[in-house]
Amino acid sequence: MPSDPSPLGAIGAYAVHLPRHGLATTAFGDAGRPGRQARTVAAPDEDAVTLAVAAALPLADEIAGAASLLLATSQPPYLDKGSAATVHAALELPATVAAADLVGLRAGASALALALRGGGAVVAADLRTAAPGVPDELAHGDAAVAFVPARAGRPVVASVLAHVAATEELMERWRAPGEAHPTVWDERFSAGVLGAAASAAAVAALERAGIERPDHVVVACANPRAAAAARKALGGDGEDAALERLTGTSGAAHLGLLLADALDRAGAGETILALSAADGADAFVVRADVPAGAGRRGPSAREQAQALAYVTYDRFLRWRGLLEISGAKRPDPAPPAAPPALRTRDWKFGLVAARCSACGAVTTPPGRACAACGAIDAHEPVSLRDKPARVVSFTVDHLTPTPAPPLILAIVDVEGGGRRSVQVTDAPAAGIRVGDVLLPSFRRLSSTDGIHNYFWKARPEAA
């Protein structure tokens, strides 16, 4: 097993996160079952930041030792403000780990190339929403994936043998700031241009790596004609297309999603040609250096795709804000103010509570005084973000307007100490019960005046 990173970069570990929900039909009524095409669907309290945190959490300790963290997405929650900084805070990374955003459909491939060469970690996360009624509405999906670089002296999961990039200025698909849906030119026109760029990059990368025929081929391209043509020309076995039929294409995250799935299938010593076609093409030749799936943290993409809970089309449209149903009028929640958010950032973003040095009790939210014995300034930080909690009591609120009614609030006892009040997300149709185990989940509580209020909700353990 190689122990030193490749000169072009090497992968030390990876993780994938798919939202819990899926969409299998664009017909109103029944949720249906997966047919020729289905897609993953983020909940209304999820966005690129929360998906990125979910994917990166299993790798947080390893990301803490990386040189940088790059967030790749085509749907950043903010433009002037860096979204990667929020992911950085939620992972409790050292301030010395630089965090930056890359934006666009090609951002996932670019971030992977830059991060691995520079010893950085990359998280790619996206939400994709086509206009209702377009022919490929189900072909877009939501997903996130994270990779961390291998370090010298540690096992290498996969080595990057070659990377070739080609750039084309092409009005193939675009979305102006403020627009909800992408505009797509005639795919027959752009398929030839993207296909030619992808084939040329793939041939050059394979030649540079000294490989005549790779063992696995994955093609990430939002243009289905170009993707199908590239798979056929390069001898792909269609396994990547089979995964796409369950998830849809996930924008900036899609190359990483397909590469992670290929690493789940590739045996030690087998090679993978990972090809992305957007604004040109990126071709990576990757060699798996450990048995299939050995470098993955958490469940695989296919395991998550097979466990999706499918929602009705009207529910999906409500979640995306495309179908508005007026309910009881309530004032908008107040946006968080910057000064208190900064003062409480360890609790707000990292879910860091206080454990009393005198009595051992955990206070949530943390404060100067112990909630149990009253000791002042006698505590140490303790993170609750990885700790399960058990439901003590809960309330089901059918009156508060929410895109995913009803609103469930629970009081939970955290494993190892601490009791807190949480919003419950991703609850099954049957609801929750006292005694159920919930896991922390970084979500968006609300968005008011252009400010997204992020905090840790809780989801059922099985979700």
Image: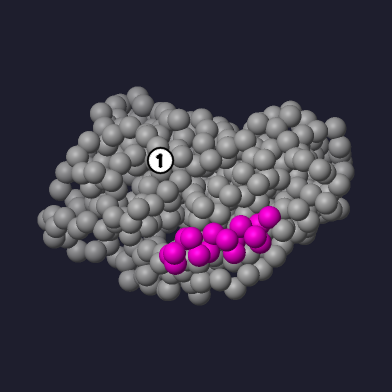
**Which segment is the magenta one?**
184-199
Q: Residue at x 19, y 51 (%)?
A: 400
Q: Number of labelled discs?
A: 1
Location of residue 101 (image quadrant): bottom right
Q: Residue at x 33, y 56 (%)?
A: 134
Q: Is residue 392 left or right of residue 199?
A: left
Is 35 in the magenta?
no
Can residue 14 be seen here? no
**Horizontal and vertical percent for residue 290?**
77, 32
Badge 1 amino acid: Gln
Residue under label 1: 37
**Secondary structure beneath disc 1?**
loop
Q: Is residue 7 left or right of residue 332?
A: right
**Horizontal and vertical percent for residue 412?**
37, 35
As displayed, is residue 238 above or below residue 88? above
Location of residue 372 (image quadrant): top left
Q: Residue at x 23, y 47 (%)?
A: 314
Q: Is residue 309 left or right of residue 306?
A: left
**Horizontal and vertical percent for residue 221?**
55, 54
Circle 1 residues within 10 Å: few <14, some 14–19, many ≥20: many
Q: Quadrant of the N terminus?
A: top right
Q: As rendered, which of 218 and 385 lies closer to the eye?
A: 218
Q: Is residue 20 left or right of residue 8?
A: left
Q: Quadrant of the C terminus?
A: top left
Report the predominant secondary structure element of the magenta stretch. Answer: helix
